[in-house]
Amino acid sequence: MKILEGLLYTKDHEWVRVEGNKAYIGISDYAQEAMGDIVYVELPELDEEFEQEDTLCAIESVKAANDIFLPIAGRVVEINEALEEEPEAVNEHPYENWIACVEMADQSQLKDLMNAGAYEEFIAEAEEE
């Protein structure tokens, strides 16, 4: 399982890559592994606005459908349309295949997220339970 430095993570296993006022959102390697083979990614609409922790989209795998939550409030400014044709790309390269890019409404919400080290500890503790 890979955890990349330089990204921020949520307890729901989403990752965030910050570039200026934009945040690219995806799911972690841990999440895609737990989901199994991904067969469908329901992308959000462009210009749709979300509050922190709103459901951004859903991902369906051979095991189940999972909601993906938005770690920070904002407006969707880009979606990864390639996932409509190749949802399995999230399994193959979870950190390269982001789902949506959001223009952040409140960058202070980033403080609620974990860095790579804290996320690694979070997973280790969860696996011990």
Image (cartoon, helix red, strand yellow):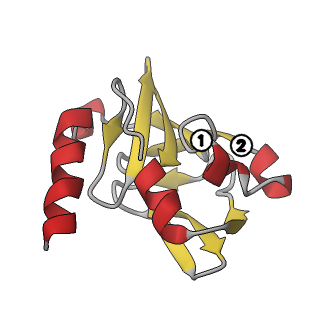
Give the residue drawn at x 15%, y 47%: 121
Mark before the other along the chain sequence, 1 or 2: 2
The kind of residue tagged 1 is Trp
Tell me: 124 left or right of 13.
left
For label 1, count other residues whose C-alpha is less than 10 Å away and answer few (under 14), some (14-19) or many (20+). Answer: many
Cα distance in 3D space between marks 1 and 2: 7 Å
Indicate left or right for 129 with 71 as reference. Answer: left
Q: Is residue 45 left or right of residue 122?
A: right
Give the residue type at disc 2.
Asn
- Residue closest to the eye, 95 or 103: 95
> Which residue is disc 1 drawn over?
98
Q: Are marks 1 and 2 in contact (CB under 8 Å)?
A: yes
| x and y, in percent, of residue 10 in the image | 30, 51
Quarter holding the C terminus is bottom left
Residue appearing at x 24%, y 40% in the figure:
109
Which label number is shown at residue 77? Answer: none
Q: Is residue 112 visible?
A: no
Relative height, residue 8 to residue 13 (above, below): above
Does dot 2 land on a helix, a strand or a loop? loop
Residue 41 is drawn in which quadrant? bottom right
Relative to residue 14, is residue 116 drawn left or right? left
Q: What residue is disc 2 on?
A: 80
State which quadrant residue 30 falls in. bottom left
Mark 2: few/some/many CA within 10 Å (<14, 14-19, 20+) = some
| x and y percentages locating residue 64 in the rendered image | 57, 82
Q: Residue at x 60, y 34 (%)?
A: 96
Identify the image quadrant of residue 128: bottom left
